[in-house]
Image (cartoon, rainbow, N blue to C red):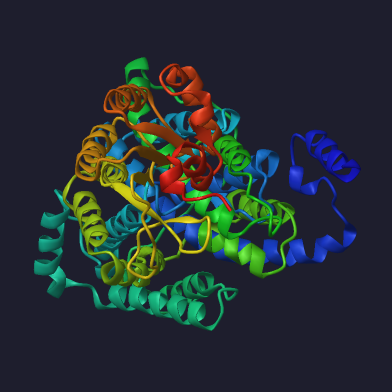
């Protein structure tokens, strides 16, 4: 108990930079190596992601620095890396494009405002411990969502890799235009893009610690300079202005702030879903539950800082977080070291990026896009649950065919509908007694059970709510009329919740059974919420408290007739 109190006091006394609260000198080598590796991975990735959203490369650097600093300040996970992310960038870029063109002066201020709003929603989610919102996307919907996002990334980068102008219009129309124009591709540009893609893919196959993207960018830049490829139609990043980031608020109209609210809420939900997965996959303390809500605070702080310093919303990165964990990172100091390197490059090394070909960044993003697709999970879902496989297809199709933010919203809606559909499918389960024991078990072809004449034991293995209460009531009365029992036992161990609608139907059920001469008992009402529902909705007014039992066997012995129970031993 003393150790637990000491640990709690230590955590509360470190409201910021929590991962550094017990820093030891021997942690530094691991953090230094992890920080250097993370910077090597992040530099090309952040440039490419910024380009994906229609921003200059240094904006990606600012997002990484802000995300790393914000998460180190308020986040809880020791390994998590925050910054520009290819999952959310296509979503908010599509939403911002409806308000301003990416080349217009209003595009960046809108992105900054969006980052502030996303950060605010994440901070509120962390403060009010709304981590459950992350469960809005089921696994099949998440897999479909990622597949759709991946196709957006691939299609958006193909013009740069092919050396062609980017087509406008809906996704399917853009794919058709690219297919028709593919023969006009610039061979040098295509070679650079595919070459960088091959280097990144080979590096990843050998070891995730190898900075394949950085190696590819350096090799592509050397090729551009040595071969004078700019004169042969290869487009490059160009000079990056070296400016020290200063805080400012976006100058946009109040009505534009209002238009950004739905998009920011959507982005915040996606960030919460991905962050929950990342922080649970790489826990700070193995064996202990992840503090997801604390990590929402860190991501929220990162997005707020990004908005104040001229960047866009940030997200957690599964690959970069894995790199920190695998290369010996101990605390968020590794992220701060990487952020310092990236900031130095942004401020002092802009000319180093002058000859980086855009096709090389496209090659990096082609790899990222393909890595996002969960091929194994798609196959597994297809084999094990065909209805949920159609959820994967429907979500991906919605994101591909519709404007991307609408597709994501539909994906969330499909996930919720799937959950509702699963609840409505819950049906009554009949229980039988295992011969020679006091155990009552759901009827199964694999277990030989026995029924007791005059006794009906049933249960609903789901929350009892407005979604299934009517079906529960109808099915139960069909059973009662078919079996005509003297004792009805409701086995409630798998019913964690009872809402108002269900409680009213239970009241009617208890009253109708009394009129029919059927005694009703409840067994294993274990859920505290279900117990509270019995109190709150006045169910004890129609069902005596002494008809609540800890087991089915107790209920049968107490309320079944002596003839049913048999002679006492």
Q: Picture coordinates of residue 456 (x, y %)? A: 34, 45
When asked about the image quadrant of residue 139, the answer is: bottom left
**Relative height, residue 344 to residue 40 (above, below):** above
- Front residue (pair 405, 235): 405
When asked about the image quadrant of residue 506, the answer is: top left
What residue is drawn where x is 64% and y is 50%?
289
Q: Picture coordinates of residue 87 (x, y %)? A: 40, 52
- Front residue (pair 435, 284): 435
Q: Is residue 503 visible?
A: yes
**Relative height, residue 2 to residue 207 (above, below):** above
What residue is drawn where x is 30% and y is 61%?
157
Q: Residue 22 vs residue 54: left or right?
A: right
- Front residue (pair 206, 184): 206
Image quadrant holding the N terminus, namely top right
Q: Picture coordinates of residue 318 (x, y %)? A: 52, 59
Q: Is residue 84 visible?
A: no
- Front residue (pair 253, 186): 253
What residue is drawn where x is 43% and y is 23%?
543
What residue is drawn where x is 29% and y is 38%?
95
**Relative height, residue 427 to residue 181 (above, below):** above
Image mark count: 0
**Relative height, residue 216 to residue 127 (above, below):** below
Q: Picture coordinates of residue 179 (x, y %)? A: 12, 68
């Amino acid at each position: 108990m003393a150790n637990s109190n000491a640990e709690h006091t230590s955590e509360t006394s470190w409201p910021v930079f929590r991962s550094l609260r017990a820093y030891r000198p021997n942690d530094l080598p691991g953090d230094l190596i992890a920080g250097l590796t993370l910077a090597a991975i992040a530099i090309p990735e952040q440039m490419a992601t910024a380009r994906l959203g229609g921003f200059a490369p240094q904006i990606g650097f600012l997002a990484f620095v802000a995300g790393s600093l914000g998460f180190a300040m308020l986040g809880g996970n020791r390994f998590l890396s925050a910054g520009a992310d290819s999952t959310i960038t296509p979503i908010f870029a599509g939403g911002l494009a409806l308000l301003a063109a990416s080349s217009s002066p209003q595009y960046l201020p809108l992105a900054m405002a969006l980052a502030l709003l996303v950060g605010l929603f994440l901070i509120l989610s962390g403060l009010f411990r709304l981590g459950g919102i992350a469960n809005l996307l089921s696994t099949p919907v998440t897999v479909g969502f990622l597949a759709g996002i991946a196709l957006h990334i691939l299609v958006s980068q193909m013009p740069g890799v092919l050396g062609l102008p980017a087509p406008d219009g809906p996704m399917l129309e853009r794919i058709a235009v690219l297919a028709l124009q593919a023969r006009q591709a610039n061979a040098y540009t295509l070679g650079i893009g595919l070459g960088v893609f091959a280097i990144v893919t080979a590096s990843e196959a050998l070891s995730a610690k190898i900075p394949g993207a950085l190696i590819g960018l350096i090799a592509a830049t050397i090729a551009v300079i040595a071969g004078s490829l700019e004169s042969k139609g290869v487009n490059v990043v160009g000079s990056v202005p070296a400016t020290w980031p200063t805080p400012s608020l976006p100058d946009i109209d109040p009505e534009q702030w209002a238009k950004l609210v739905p998009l920011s809420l959507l982005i915040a939900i996606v960030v919460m879903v991905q962050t929950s997965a990342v922080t649970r996959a790489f826990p700070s303390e193995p064996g202990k539950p992840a503090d997801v809500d604390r990590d929402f605070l860190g991501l929220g702080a990162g997005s707020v800082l990004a908005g104040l310093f001229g960047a866009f919303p940030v997200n957690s990165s599964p690959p970069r977080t894995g790199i920190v964990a695998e290369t010996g990172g101990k605390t968020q100091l590794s992220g701060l070291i990487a952020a310092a390197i990236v900031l130095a490059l942004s401020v002092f090394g802009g000319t180093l990026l002058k000859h980086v070909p855009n096709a090389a960044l496209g090659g990096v993003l082609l790899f990222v896009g393909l890595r996002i697709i969960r091929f194994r999970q798609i196959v597994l879902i297809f084999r094990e649950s065909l209805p949920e496989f159609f959820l994967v297809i429907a979500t991906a199709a919605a994101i591909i065919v519709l404007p991307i933010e609408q597709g994501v919203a539909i994906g969330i809606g499909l996930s919720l509908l799937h959950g509702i559909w699963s609840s409505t499918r819950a049906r009554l389960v009949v229980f039988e007694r295992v011969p020679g024991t006091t155990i009552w078990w759901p009827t199964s072809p694999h277990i030989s059970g026995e029924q007791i004449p005059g006794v009906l034991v049933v249960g609903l293995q789901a929350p009892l709510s407005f979604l299934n209460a009517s079906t529960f009531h109808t099915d139960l009365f069909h059973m009662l009329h078919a079996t005509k029992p003297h004792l009805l036992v409701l086995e409630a161990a798998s019913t964690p919740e009872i809402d108002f609608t269900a409680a009213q139907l239970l009241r009617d059920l208890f009253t109708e059974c009394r009129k029919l001469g059927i005694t009703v008992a409840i067994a294993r009402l274990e859920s505290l919420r279900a117990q509270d529902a019995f109190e709150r909705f006045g169910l004890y007014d129609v069902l005596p408290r002494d008809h609540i039992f800890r087991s089915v066997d107790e209920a049968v012995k107490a309320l079944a007739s002596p003839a049913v129970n048999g002679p006492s031993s």
